[in-house]
Image (cartoon, coloured by chain):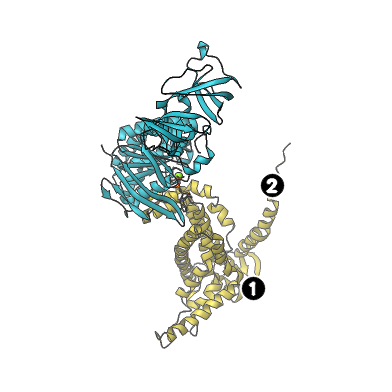
Chain colours: A cyan, B yellow
Amino acid sequence: MKGSDVTVSGISKSFGAFKALKGVSLEIKKGEFFSLLGPSGCGKTTLLRVIAGFEEPDSGIVGIDGRDVSGLPPDKRRCNTVFQSYALFPHLTVFENVAFPLRLKRLPNRLVRELVMKHLSLVQLEGHAEKRPSMLSGGQKQRVAIARALINEPSVLLLDEPLSALDAKLRQRMLVELDSIHDKVGITFIYVTHDQQEALSVSDRIAVMDQGLVLQIGSPQQIYENPASDFVARFIGETNIFAGVVASREGPFATVECEGLGPLLVEANGEAPLGARVSVAVRPEKIRIAAESPGARPELNVLSGVVEEPIYSGFQTKYIIHLAGGGSVTVFRQHANWSEGVPDLKWKDEVYLSWSARDSVVVESDAVANDEVVNGAARPPAP
Amino acid sequence: MTRNYGKIYAGPQALWLTVFFAAPLAIIVAYSFMKRDLYGGVLPQASLEAYRSLANPTLLSVAWRTLWVSFIATVFTILIALPCGYSIARSGNQAMRLFLVIVPFWTNFLIRIYAWIAILGNEGFLNDLLKILGLRTNSVQFLYNQGAVILVLVYMYLPYAILPLFSTIDKFDFTLLEAARDLGATRMQALMKVLIPNIRGGLVTAVLFTFIPIFGAYAVPLLVGGKDAYMLGNVIADQVTKTRNWPLASSISMGVTVLTGLAAVIFAATSRRTAQHVVEDSGIGPLSATAGIPSGGQA
Ligand SMILES: Nc1ncnc2c1ncn2[C@@H]1O[C@H](COP(=O)(O)OP(=O)(O)O)[C@@H](O)[C@H]1O
Ligand SMILES: [Mg+2]
């Protein structure tokens, strides 16, 4: 591995009275594609700037390869940044933008040309070397910024929402490309984004942040399937949250008594002591929806309700179901069997919802969020 | 049918330029090719006499001194104006600081020159201060030399350099400096290789706004310079009012105009070639800048 490991321990940073980072610690492995994911304003950029050396933290240490780099200026750290706004030099051509770090080192012309062309071909921009940045499209500017950040052969690449200025289609393409660049250069990527879909699809691991704190660190799967809290569950994809009290524990399961809905059998990985107020999270795609009751089976939760709103979107239909016990639930139904005559569910149809106990988890309830989401419907992730 | 309203709208400006720029210039051109009348004015006879007398060693040495003083004063002005413009652009209360830059204009420029005389004079504040501090027992001669002229010229034209520099630096994207630092540049390298090239438009404007009026300076060298620091503006004034050789005054004026015009064009052209798009982006290209330059010779 050519990359470095990055250790962030106990970083705090305030701007005036405002605490942007409140003691953030991370262990990022060599060559990892690590994402910082969180809503806008949660401190992602600030953390990245602390790692790059643009901000001096109030307390805490940044280590690269076990060496404390706190206090080193940005030009002395072996990490380079891809800025959100690209930050290409408008007075220089694409070639000279990418060559900028090499010119500073006064490398001979022949070597500069060789290295620059190599990196321009890495981002597929060989034909644009003599253009000015102002003549490039957003996606092309992004590639120049990546090539320029890589030419110094950093051991860590910091990317601050690099795709946020691109349109949705292009974003998908660039994401795949970033992933392949990561595979090719093999260095550590620290990728900042507020888009959970981006983070889930490319990261080796994700740190979910909110209000200057890291809430959970884990693989995309861990974060999606076993969110640590209400906030994480709701931020990553859509989810249904039910509030309740732990009534009993048996093996990996807990029975949670939910207001109006009765007992739900739920997988409990973390601590769920008897009598604790917790939240139960169920992903909308894990819930089966049917016109007839699936019958009682162990480890199967069944609820009944009526269709409040079917929302057709081609590959699937999203249903909002009003539960008999109060509150509503979001359910996704894939259209894999559409042609086989699965009955179409319409407004006011009575339906049965069921899901396996293993497909729902107990999550820590955020005290604040609790009040507003008692048996609440799935919410879209925060912007 | 579409009518070209542009021409109509340009009318007032064309009239203005004709009356206050083209016509006086034409008169000077005409006078410079005529014979002098003994008591001022001109005789309506064509002559190259005025241009022949330009090749006169005293005049050439004054021309050389004028170039030199203008150059040094411009360099100092820009060196001071750059950090000023930068700090105003980056400060939280731009309006207040810009206001402070403009405040001196509320006082007549002659009064401001006399203020400098009050400061630098043999019985002035500075000498008083030196005596109070016990550093000197007798007065230091600060006034009536080239140094005093340069000092006061720099003071006079500083705002003309600060304002265009401020306005381009204000539009500069400072993340570019962070990007440069990130890519391995030291603080100084980032400023020289990224800030300076990107504010070239403002620099060109600032240089022209200071160099051209300083080249035609009249009052400052007259009042704080004395005979040894005379500049072309003073020679022209003397030819008009004392020697009463109007054709010569006109031909020297033509010389000043041609020299400054040439310097401006060369300077603007070289800067334009290296930073064309930047100049265009900033909207203060050297040409639009020259059009608004404070006329030479007022100070
Ligand atoms: N230089 C600064 N001065 C004052 N407040 C700042 C500064 N930089 C960031 N902040 C504040 O810190 C918080 C976190 O900002 P940031 O790290 O940019 O968030 P994110 O990148 O996650 O959107 C925001 O509320 C922002 O207003
Ligand atoms: Mg940000």
Looking at the image, the residue that sits furthest to the right is: B1
Give residue A356's position: percent from left, percent from top. Answer: 42, 24
Give residue A83's position: percent from left, percent from top. Answer: 42, 43
Residue B51 visible? The answer is no
Q: Quadrant of the N terminus of chain B?
A: top right
Residue of label 1? B40
CB at mark 1 closer than 8 A to ligand 1? no
Secondary structure at badge 1 equals: loop
Secondary structure at badge 2 equals: helix
Q: Quadrant of the C terminus of chain B?
A: bottom right
Rendered residue at 44%/86% (across/down): B132
Residue B131 versus residue B277 in the image, above or below: below
Looking at marks 2 and 1 on the same chain, the residue that comes earlier in the sequence is marked by: 2
Residue A292 visible? The answer is yes
Give residue A226's position: percent from left, percent from top. Answer: 39, 33
Q: In which quarter of the view is residue A80 placed?
A: top left
Residue A41 versus residue B224 in the image, above or below: above
Looking at the image, the residue that sits furthest to the top is: A340
Amino acid type, callout 2: Lys
Marks 2,1: beta carbons within 8 A: no
Q: In which quarter of the view is residue A200 placed?
A: top left
Residue of label 2? B7
Q: Nearer the viewer, residue A305 or A101?
A: A305
Is B69 situated left or right of A152 in this image?
right
Q: Nearer the viewer, residue B38 or A86?
A: A86
Give residue B20's position: percent from left, percent from top. Answer: 66, 61
Residue A177 versus residue A334 in the image, above or below: below
